[in-house]
Structure formats: C-alpha cells, structure tokens
Image (spheres, helix red, strand yellow):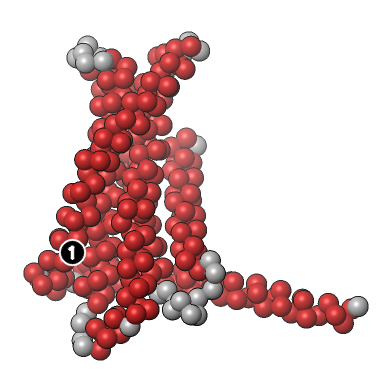
Amino acid sequence: MIVSMHPSRGSLSLRIWQAARDTAVAWGRIFYLFAMVWVLLLSPSTYRWPSLQPILQRMYRDTAPILLGFTVLAALICLVITRIVVVTAISYGLSRYALEMVVRVLVLELIPLTASLFVAMRCTIPYATELAVMRSSGAWDARAQRGEALMRLEVLPRVVSGLYASVTLAALSCVVALVMAYIGVYGFSWAGVPGYTRMFGHVFNPSVTLVFVLKTWLSSLAVAIIPVSTGLYAKPRRLSRPGDELNGLVRMFAVLLLIELASLMGNYY
C-alpha cells in the first residue's frame, strides 16, 4: 500500500511543478511584452508615418465606434444608481451624504473598472484571438521571415489602442457620471452648483486624485497587455491544454482585483 502511493505523490508534485513553471513563464512573458512596448514607444522610429499610421488607425477604429454607445450606457447606469442611493439615503436620514456617496461609488470605484472591462471584452480579448490565429496559421512566421517588424506593426498598435480606449472611456464616463449625479439630485437647476463644487473638491483631494489616476492607468495597462500577451504566446491548438485560453483572463481579472483592493486601501485607510 505504501509503495502504491509513490506514483500519485510523484504525479502530484510534477503537476505542481508544471503549474508553477507555467505561471512563472506566463508572467515573465507579460513583463517582457510590457518592457518591449515601452521600448518601442520611446523609440523615435515608432513615430515615423509607416509605423505611426497603423497605431492611429487602430486607435480610431477601436475607440470612435463605441464612444456613443458606452456613453449612453454609462449615463443610464449612473442615473439609476444615483436614484437608488439617494432614495436609500433619504429613507435613513442621511440625505446630506447621498451625493458624496454617489460620487465616491461611481466615479472613484465603478467607472474605471467598468471602462476597463468593457474595453477588454470589446477590443483586447479579440486581439488575443487574432494574434493566436495568426501564430497558429503560420502567417506570423511567414511575415517574420520576410523581415516585417511584427512587434511594431501588429502588437504595438493593439496594445496602444487598448490603453487609449480604456483611458478615454474612463475619462468620458467619469464626466458623464458627475453630470448624471448632479441631475439625479438637483435636477436641471443651477441652484446646487456651489454646494456640488464644494463637495467635489472635498472628495477629490490630492491623495484621492492621485490614487484615481494611478488606478485608471494601471487598469488600462492590465487590459491592454495581458490579453495581448496571451494571444501572442499562445500554443498551437494541437499542443494546447484545456483551459489554456482562460488562464490569461484569470490573470487579467486577478490584476484588476488587486488594483481595486489597493485603490480601496489608498482611499479609505
């Protein structure tokens, strides 16, 4: 009986070792891609028209079509959440804190995370699929043999476009949330502007503003880098294991969760 347990122990330790190795390799590739992107962004040759054109085209193509739809969606969500919070606060006699609570919940916490997840689902996760198909079909290797700078022409535009779309949607939806919060409390009247501006200045002190900016940028980087890295280094279908495609999503959501926890600690502790 004791001898029969050795194979299972060996297979378990082997699986643990393989999982740890795959995780370390995956994170190493993510950081390598992050460093490569910043090197390319700092390179003057990136800003010459042959290299800059695909970046600008993808930024426009991936951001402009979703601006209106996401703005309308954000406005509806903000208006509904504002109404719920205000009615709940009034019922508990906390109406004086309702507007500040709305701004903290919507602008500081929900809006950047929602924008990052929207861009991930709409843009960067499909990018991963495109790159994986390009690698598995052999088109990547064929173009690389012809001397094409694929990191500059294919990878960098996708990463920059995802980052730009996430930051743009977060900034736009924050403005929409502030407007909807005001309308939800004061209606279409200018009477509440002085009190609203005082509350806004109280909430967005320098430390909270710094945390908000860092959270928005780090979340945007996470949704821009991690899915693209997953697709870029994806194994061929015949060699991949079940669940390999989901590992990149798990890592992305884990990073977003850590960023959100760090933001909460920075704002409220």
Answer with left or right where residue 184 lies relative to residue 13.
left
Q: Write down the residue under mark 1.
A: 55
What residue sits 54% from the left and 69% below the top? Answer: 242
Image quadrant in which the N terminus is located: bottom right
Badge 1 element: helix
What residue sits 32% from the left and 17% below the top? Answer: 185
Q: Residues within 10 Å of mark 1 (few under 14, many from 20)?
A: many
Report the front residue among 247 and 20. Answer: 247
> x%, y% of residue 245?
47, 66
Answer with left or right where residue 110 lies relative to residue 247.
left
Residue that protrudes farthest toward the bottom in the picture: 145
Rendered image quadrant of residue 224: bottom left
Rendered image quadrant of residue 37: bottom left
When the figure is inspected, residue 154 is found, relative to residue 116, above or below; the finding is below
Mark yes or no: residue 263 visible: yes
Answer with left or right where residue 117 lies relative to residue 264.
left
The kind of residue on which mark 1 rests is Ile
What residue sits 34% from the left and 34% below the top? Answer: 107
Residue that protrudes farthest toward the left in the picture: 49
> x%, y% of residue 248?
46, 63
> x%, y% of residue 255?
46, 55
Rendered image quadrant of residue 124: bottom left
When the figure is inspected, residue 162 is found, relative to residue 239, above or below; the finding is above
Mark yes or no: residue 174 visible: no
What residue sits 28% from the left and 15% below the top? Answer: 186
> x%, y% of residue 89?
45, 16
